Image (cartoon, coloured by chain):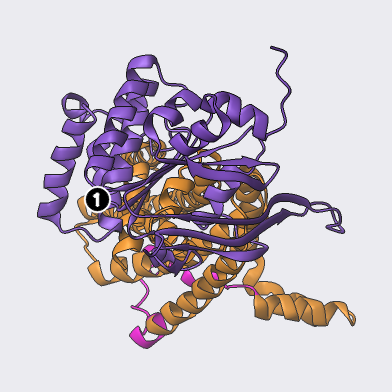
Chain colours: A orange, B purple
Amino acid sequence: MNKILAIAGVVIKELYRRKDFYVLFVLTALITLVMGSATFFNDPKIVRYLVEVCLLLIWVSAIAIAIGTAARQIPAECESRTIFPLLAKPVTRAHVILGKFLGCWFACGIALVAFYAFAAIVRGSREAYWPMLHYFQASWLHWMGLAVMIAMVILGSLIFSAPSANATICEIIIVGILLLGGHLDTVALRQPPPLDLITYTIYFFIPHLEWFDVRDILVHDQPLIKWWAVLGATAYAAAYTATFLFLAWLIFRRKPLNA
Amino acid sequence: MEPILKLEDLRVEFRSGALRHNPKVALRGLNLEVYRGEIFGFIGPNGAGKTTTINVLLGFVAPTAGNAYLFGVNVREPIARQRIGYLPELTYYYKFLTVEELLRFYARIFGIPRRETDRRIDQLLRLVELEQVRNRPIKTYSKGMQQRVGLAQALINDPELLILDEPTSGLDPIGRMKVREIIQRLKNEGKTVFFSSHELGEVETVCDRVGILHEGELRTVGRVSDLKAQFQTDLERIFLKIIGYQLNT
């Protein structure tokens, strides 16, 4: 475990020494603050729109950070050849994959804490309303969803030759799942055979990332999600993450590396 | 005496293309033993298979046939690399880290306790003369300094066996001399050094034994002094003769 955490530590250091996170955070903060300073039609519920936009920006920024960071990890190690001194130590390729995953995931977790804290402060300052458990559930499920996305991108980085191709394909898949994943069963009902079967198969195989998007509980002050459901979603994310990482390991362990 | 490094009928083939026909044979049944306290020079022309042998020893490439052992443990087991240090030909390190952070990272991988890590980092940075720049990112270092970072990282676990791939490649004469001094110091401390090089003069000065590799085959292995006595000439001419190069003079 120490080796995995050591590798993860380097990933986190790399992220906070790069400018991606700061740029996205400043952009999110700036757009939210500019919108927060405006008043439209003296609507007393304007804060809801503000929170909605802020949370959407957080989702977009977090996906950009997760995909951007995860897509380059292993290809960059191979390209800059830092993988060689690393694997010359008593480190297995499974350690590398798990370390890279944990590093990206923890780094995204740190970014999420900053983003959600900002959202809470903006809302709290306007409404004097602090639904802390709602924030916890939303950010926790968001983080679990990011775990699945990061594992998927790491797997992609071992399949596709260029990090940019991998990032683009993964972005399309992730955004596609978030927007359409939950409606595929309805679409399947209207398809003739065998298209209905194919659509159903896709519906049951894809990770339903939209389940982790619970922004509505914050925007519309909905009641807290049942804790057993949060636990179930966490287990679901863990299962998909483990599957993607296992597949990544199967590919990486056989990959010849020539120093 | 048990060898520290052992190669047994080692064969490596690289296959390419969809049908994976006509494999390129990089190593053809290599047999070699290196013993404790030796400095062993592994020499050969470009494409002879030196780096492939090192890649197998480090677990980067799986052998097609045969086996390789470090300290009696098959190199397929990661634990075989617990007591070795590796210096690659070129410097490949996380350039956004400082040398101290890099050494701390590798020390953590070896499971070295924190206090011991601090002591070793101080000692190694003194040895490679990077104490003054320990808090500067590696990307700001010159090539020679980066090569010395490589030496420091290779020594962080106080290894019993050092594998050096062209350790003086691209260094200026002072850099080369410093690396040679460090190798000599390690020999005096009883460490085993296995290194590949094109610099035959350097190999002749530093090594106890040499192995000459050509086209994936080990053509000869022996003590430098014995080879010189047998062929009545210097190592460079012995090398050229063994690989079949015809000298005009």
Q: Secondary structure at mark 1?
A: loop
Residue A215 highlighted magenta (yes or no)? yes
B86 left or right of A135 in image? right
The answer to whether any part of residue B199 appears in the image is no
Instruction: Quarter of the image for the N terminus of chain B: give it.
Output: bottom left
Image vertical order of residue A211 relative to residue B23, above or below: below
Image vertical order of residue A101 relative to residue B215, above or below: below
Dividing the picture into quadrants, the one containing residue A38 is: top left
B181 left or right of B168 in image? left
Image vertical order of residue A97 relative to residue B196, above or below: below
**Can you give x and y, in whole percent of width and height, for residue B33 in the image?**
48, 56
Residue hosting label 1? B158
Residues in magenta, as a range: A206-230
A196 left or right of B153 in image? right
The answer to whether any part of residue A244 appears in the image is yes
Residue A213 highlighted magenta (yes or no)? yes
- Name the amino acid, label 1: Asp
